[in-house]
Image (cartoon, helix red, strand yellow):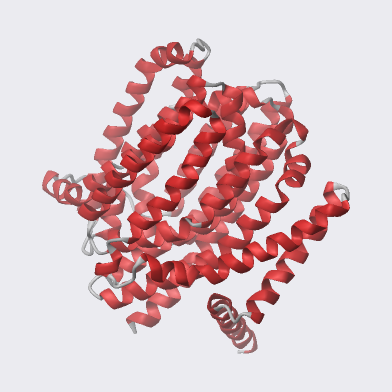
Amino acid sequence: MAESFNRKNIFSGFVWRFAERSGAQGVAFFVSIVLARILVPEDYGTIALIGVFTAILNVFVDCGLGNALIQKRDADDCDFSSVFYFNLFMCSVLYMVMFFFAPYIAVFYNKPELVLIIRVLSLTLIISGLKNVQQAYVSRNMMFRRFFFATLGGTIGAAFVGIMMALYGFGVWALVIQQLFNVTVDAIILWFTVKWRPKKIFSLERLKGLFSFGWKLLVSSVLDTFYRELRQLIIGKKYSSQDLAYYNQGQKIPNLVVMNINTSIDSVLLPAMSNVQDDVVKVGSMTRRAIKISTYIMAPCMMGIAFLAPSLVRLILTDKWLSCVSFLRIFCITYMFYPVHTANLNAIRALGRSDIFLKLEIQKKAVDLVLLLSSMWFGVMAMAYSLLISSVLCQLINSWPNKSLLHYGYLQQIKDILPAISIAILMGSMVWCISLFHLPDVIQVLIQVPVGVAIYILLSKLFHIEAYEYLKNILRQRIGKLKEQKNA
């Protein structure tokens, strides 16, 4: 009964979460295309400079307590309400920090115009505090349908606002107001569609109990975010905002795919694993299945984008963004292995081993920092390659504990994902050959995409890829049930 319930909820949760991510990212991607054609790279670079600081502070929005609420088996209204009031207080403090430090950040970058932009954009911190516990409640109860309506509403509204402001010449402010509008509408819709409300109760003891689990995840997130943003801070300070814009733009296209797939799996997998945390065999089975399926979906997308990169950039962003092609390819290879990171870390969190999670993060950041400091003197491209090397090494670190916890080590994981990655590379190489005919970009992409899909499916059948057979059977079952319901 429990297994059936889990399978049904996991699949349904993934579908809704994937629909929400796909819809939101699809709209956001369309808007980014329009805005990239209207605005100049420097505008995007300016926002990226501020994003370094807001991203780090956003980690403190829930202090790891959101994950603690999801992981705790008997979390009740007292737990949720205590976290809500604490988060609101913390977010107000974080906003004041950004408000008063804005002039110093502007001096650091030698850009006086950043002061007002920082103070306005940082309002997203307070709004995030209002919706954070609602999001944890939705995730814990696998009510991902709520995310769909909230996120899509905010994204569509923000799209209209951002494009109109850009057309009327507001420049960088079009990007600022777009982000602020998005998170505000998202919070409002989520607040009205989720029935949970904070009660007039607060327990410091409950908060301490949750924090005993959450603080390790908080420190891990701080380390991860700080390192990720440190790379951008160095690019923006040592090189230029234009270099940072190309670096970030190269990240956007593969990130669109990764966020749709990886975030969907991450959101569903943690509560699902937490529900069976006492059964190590089931957690191990779910981890293996997640790695196989998500890699099978992710690999062809990343390889396809990497091989089609110049045509896609010219077609979508125009020639002025061609300098981001090399970065785009590096990120494609890096992101292709993200399912390994996600599944391994979710298994460790679900088992309640936040102590191991923190140790891993410290080890990874030590490796990251050495690579970053070694590469920063040789240009932005060298820094991007150091990220790729770091990703490979961190896969090994993330998977190491699960060799003993789940009896599922890194060599087994590589063996599981190698078939999908191999046929994805083969598919990408075959599709790339079409570019030798030097067709117009629109025609070339319209031919390459369907041909690539067909080749990948054909290769999956030919080599009997397990993930393909699994997805095909799931799809058949769902179609069969829909037909039965229709005929009933």
User: Would residue 259 be visible to someone looking at this image?
Assistant: no
Can you tell which quarter of the image residue 409 is in?
Answer: bottom left
Q: Is residue 148 above or below residue 293?
A: above
Q: Residue drawn at (56%, 76%), measured in percent from left and top?
A: 471
Q: Is residue 189 above or below residue 122?
A: below
Residue 129 in the image: x percent, y percent? 36, 39
| Quarter of the image that includes the C terminus | bottom right
Q: Quadrant of residue 22?
A: bottom right
Residue 406 falls left or right of residue 268? left
Measured as percent of width and height from the top left, residue 266 is found at: 42, 58
In the rendered image, residue 420, in percent from the top left (x then y), is placed at 57, 69
**Which residue lies at the image location 25% right of the left edge and 45% below the top edge?**
83
**Residue 482 quadrant:** bottom right
| Residue 36 visible in the picture | yes
Looking at the picture, how far across and down is residue 364, in whole percent? 33, 46
- Which quadrant: the N terminus? bottom left
Q: Residue at x 44, y 76 (%)?
A: 8
